[in-house]
Amino acid sequence: GTSLTRTRSGGGGGGAPETGDEDDDAVSSTGKALQSVNVAGVSLFGGMVFGSGRDLAVPHLECRDINGVDFVALKDAGFKAVVFDKDNTLTRPYEKQVWSDVAAALETCVRAFGIDNVAVLSNSAGLAQYDPKGKVAAEMERALGIGFLRHSSKKPAGNCDALVRRFGCDAREMIFVGDRYLTDVVYGNRHGMFTVRVEPFTEEGESTSIRLAKKIEGGALALWKKRPEKGRFDRTPGYKPHLLIPEGRTANDFLAAAARG
């Protein structure tokens, strides 16, 4: 099986990833500052405030962390690849090790889908603005044991051509897992993926602007999401339809047994 590096619960680390030389450190620090500015996300949110496309911010499934996802059942349903966000989904912000609480679940995912069909699409490691030479992404690949996509557009902007080439399947056959509604969930839904939103591990290490953005989007989603009895399933996590969800089943059926309430 694939061996994934773990860190102890409550473990430290944190801070921006090191890149090895002063010039790269300077670029990385600049990128970290720019990472807080997500023009596409702000623009999209502005449209949603006035009622356009709110369903894009609503995930198919919500759970505490990736332990709540039944990856084997998703593979059996016909999904072919899994795309993860990094910070607060697999690792604490800017850390270089899989958070110990989710390491076993990541291993289960890799066993179910195969190492070549699991990758990370991050708004930090692998993003040209933040990691122009891909050195952070390469370091993360060695540390986490899974691939990192090199790309030039922050989620939720950008196409998914690189993911389609990497996995050799349609975007609708992919699963996107992340902690941010207006980046991870919107990106996945824009391209027809099955989207899973997990709760962030911590705010430690995040910038003030990112913390504020998360509070704003969390408040907005609390208003935009609908309960099942309202019949607005496109805006109801757990009931949101997807092409590969078998007839007679709902997204909630892909929660791991321990996560079902």
Image: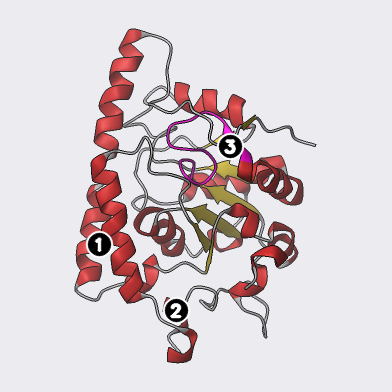
Give the magenta-colored segment's residue range: 85-100
At a point 42% along the width and 54% down the height, the residue shown is: 184
Quadrant position of residue 30: top left
Q: Is residue 43 left or right of residue 55?
A: left
Tell me how far mark 1 sits from mark 2, CA to CA: 18 Å
| Residue at disc 2, secondary structure | helix
N-term-proximal mark, 3 vs 1: 3
Residue type, numbered disc 3: Ser
Coordinates of residue 18 in the picture (x, y in percent) = 42, 18
- Considering every residue shown, the one lying at the far right of the view is 1
Residue under numbered circle 2:
234
Nearer to me, 59 or 208: 208
Nearest-to-viewer mark from 3 and 2: 3
Residue under numbered circle 3:
9
Tell me how far mark 3 sits from mark 1, CA to CA: 34 Å
At a point 31% along the width and 72% down the height, the residue shown is: 53
N-term-proximal mark, 1 vs 2: 1
Residue type, numbered disc 2: Asp
Above or below, 129 relative to 52: above
